[in-house]
Image: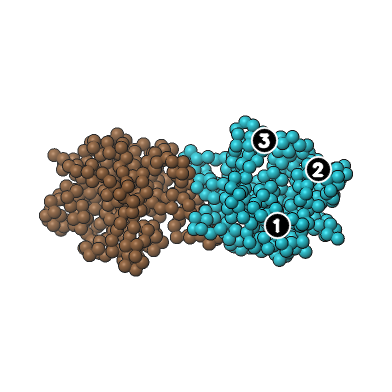
Chain colours: A cyan, B brown
Amino acid sequence: MKVVALAGGVGGAKLADGLVRILSPDELAIVVNTGDDFTHFGLHISPDLDTVCYTLAHLANTKTGWGMKNETWKALKGATQLGGPGWFSLGDRDLGTHLERTRRLAEGETLTSITQSFCQKWGIKHTIYPMCDQPVATMINTREYGWLAFQDYFVNRKCMPTVLGFEFKGIQRSKVDEDLSQKIREADHIIICPSNPWVSIDPILKVNGFGKLLEGKRVIAVSPIIGNHTIKGPAAKMFSEMGLQPSSLSVAEHYKGLIQSIVIDESDQDLIPAISRCGIISYVTDIFMKSPKDRIRLANFVLKSAAICRE
Amino acid sequence: MKVVALAGGVGGAKLADGLVRILSPDELAIVVNTGDDFTHFGLHISPDLDTVCYTLAHLANTKTGWGMKNETWKALKGATQLGGPGWFSLGDRDLGTHLERTRRLAEGETLTSITQSFCQKWGIKHTIYPMCDQPVATMINTREYGWLAFQDYFVNRKCMPTVLGFEFKGIQRSKVDEDLSQKIREADHIIICPSNPWVSIDPILKVNGFGKLLEGKRVIAVSPIIGNHTIKGPAAKMFSEMGLQPSSLSVAEHYKGLIQSIVIDESDQDLIPAISRCGIISYVTDIFMKSPKDRIRLANFVLKSAAICRE
């Protein structure tokens, strides 16, 4: 069974971690959102990409959900003491990644090549693809401040502003990596991880040519919403602000026409008929990943559901 | 007595430290070489400027002669584990400076303004001027490798290549800061600190308009050479490779036409007649600064010598 998983930050990283423990590097490739990439203190930072890589490399700080474990903060402390912005937490260990990524990008190496080189050094055997090598910036239109860069909205303003819409700046010039295209063509299943549909998955889906590659593919999504809430992040709040009831039904509707099935939480079984009316099959399990064991259990469930779907 | 001191790295920083303990912020301004500035891992690094600032702020690592005290190296370790270059030591605390400097430069702030803002935060009361706000790159022509960027020669190749000559790339577009120009005009004395004449002081002297500002000024140099050796750095080696006997006489000859007097080591008294034949007066003392006390003693001696010279 060949699988390509699409992932954003923490939730996506957790399911990806479950999947890599079940599927071989030949069977699984992971595509990660880079619409949240930004330049800070002159460094190129790829928060979602790092969250996925650090998680798979067992370097992640599981308490915070971002950054590296065993971290110190001397550089950021120095910079803020000089008047620099402290709203984006850059740990000293984490900075090593940003420094070397920035250095290589300036030398003309692609983000894909850099990511795969980093993964090799970190002992990650599965291939992780940034969604594209071209700069794409997720922009959030807000009632209070107009258009905000993603990290300004997400970290600096703690997702407080009211969301009116999204734009993926630069997406017109984006391209799907050739090797990744091949992996998608060969894939039996595409798994959309439980990441934010608006700002983690949509940027990936909107990369030039990505939609075409998915035509006729079997796609299964895992809902990032339980009841009316997200485990982490602003997905539910975004649904509300976009005038939609935050629920796994709204997630299913969001992906309508793309996915054939969705994995939803067992507490959301009442949504099955409505989801079914979208032409989407629901599979039901406990989708809350509290422990590493949960990640494997959910990954197994998703793969089993995908396989049923195939028959 | 109003003084402007010209300084490069460690030796210059030590004398500057002595001077600030004697002269008030109104009486002393310090100009620092930025020809050794470079971009590394995407960050703007100003090694001489940082050495002087860290020294005056009591943040310097006095053992290494560069970087900050109480330093850790997690970011650099992370970057090198990913294949990045480790030849330039970037400490975590030190990185804070580079991050914030890089951020502000990208926002269009001048290096002069940034430096003075940093000095204020670090509690440095005397004004420190980078030699100019325009990028100037000291290049070293070497027998073995042709032209090398300064830090490549100095740190990466440990000053091993044979020096054939120097160039200050970008110096044509450099300008002296207006406030600094005023300070130089008002100065009773210019002190050339015991820094490398070729790569620390010459870049400052060659900034557009700097030479003109020094015309008719009383200038006193402190030799960076004792016997045939430098305390630190490649000045003596450079003199040899340029076909000159490394000595305080060669330093005096280097600055001939610019300085009226030079402070040399008491062990070099035999050079006084030859230096005198250059039209330069020698003042003799122990110029080796081993302790903070030595810095004040030498600074007092230099100021006293300058004052004699004035009469």
What residue is rendered at 56% in x and 54% in y? A97
Estimate the x, y position of residue B204 in percent, counting from the top left. 29, 48
Question: What kind of element bears circle 1?
Answer: helix
- Please name the amino acid that badge 2 sits on: Leu
Question: What kind of element bears circle 2?
Answer: helix
Question: What kind of element bears circle 3?
Answer: strand
Task: Residue at the far top: name it.
Answer: A144
Nearer mark to the viewer, of 3 and 1:
1
Estimate the x, y position of residue A55 in percent, counting from the top left. 67, 54
Chain letter of the residue carrying label 1: A
- Please name the amino acid that badge 3 sits on: Leu
Q: Badge 1: how crowded within 10 Å, few (<14), some, or many (20+)?
A: some
Q: Which residue is mark 2?
A: A249
Does residue B209 appear anywhere in the picture? yes
Q: Foreground residue, A92 or A304?
A: A304
Q: Which residue is mark 3?
A: A164
Q: Which residue is mark 1?
A: A213
Q: Foreground residue, A72 or A267?
A: A267
Q: Foreground residue, A189 or B59?
A: A189
Q: Is residue A260 above or below residue A166?
A: below
* Discs 3, 1: same chain: yes
Q: Earlier in the sequence, mark 2 or mark 1?
A: 1
What residue is rendered at 74% in x and 61% in y? A187
Estimate the x, y position of residue A25 in percent, counting from the top left. 70, 64
Q: Earlier in the sequence, mark 2 or mark 3?
A: 3
**Quadrant location, the C terminus of chain B:** top left
Q: Earlier in the sequence, mark 3 or mark 1?
A: 3
Nearer mark to the viewer, of 2 and 1:
1
What residue is rendered at 33% in x and 44% in y? B132
